[in-house]
Amino acid sequence: MFHAPSSAFSRSPDAPHREEDAARILDLLALWEGDSAALRRAVEDQTDWGPFELAEMTPAFYDVYGARRILCRFVFHGEAGAREPFERDLRRRLASITSWKDAPRARSTDSTHSEIAS
C-alpha cells in the first residue's frame, strides 16, 4: 500500500489526543530550599483528596534572588468542565506549603496559555 508523504502543515492523527493531554497538565513552580523528597511528601499530602496527581518534580532553576524553583507537573484526572473548582482548591492547599507560580509554557498554542511575568 502506498502512503503519500505527510505535509509539514498537516496534523498528525495523534494531535487531538496530545492537545487533550496538554489540557490535563498543570505546571507550577515551587519556591523550595529544602529536600525535594520533603516537598514531594507535602504536596502528596495535600493532593491525595482529588483528581490532581503529582506526576513529576524537576529542579528548574534559581531565580534572580537565588531562590530555588522546582517544577511540579500535575495531571488532572477528571472531566474538563469540573477542573476549575478543583484547581482553585489545589492552589489554595499548595499555598499552605510554599510559594508557587505558574510555569511558563515551552510552546504556547493559544493566548490563554501565555507566560506569566515575574
Image: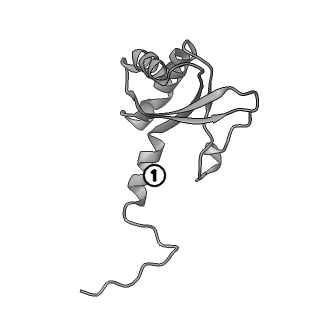
User: In the image, 109: left or right of 90?
Assistant: right
User: Residue lying furthest left in this view?
Assistant: 1
User: Residue lying furthest bottom in this view?
Assistant: 2
- Label 1 crowd bin: few (<14), some (14–19), many (20+), radius 10 Å: few
Q: Is residue 81 above or below residue 5?
A: above
Residue bearing the label numbered 1: 19
Residue 31 lies in what quarter of the image? top right
Residue 106: image x %, image y %?
59, 49
Residue 65: image x %, image y %?
76, 27
User: Residue lying furthest top in this view?
Assistant: 96
Residue drawn at (61%, 30%), measured in percent from left and top? 69
Residue drawn at (42%, 48%), measured in percent from left and top? 20
Q: Is residue 99 above or below residue 26?
A: above
Residue drawn at (63%, 36%), measured in percent from left and top? 61
User: In the image, 102: left or right of 11?
Assistant: right
- Classify the position of the N terminus by image quarter: bottom left
- Classify the position of the C terminus by image quarter: top right
Q: How many marks?
A: 1
Residue 64: image x %, image y %?
76, 32
Give the SS element for disc 1: helix
Observer-nearest of 28 and 84: 28
Residue drawn at (46%, 31%), measured in percent from left and top? 83
Residue 67 lies in what quarter of the image? top right
Q: Given the image, on which type of amino acid does mark 1 rest?
A: Glu
Coloring scheme used: one colour
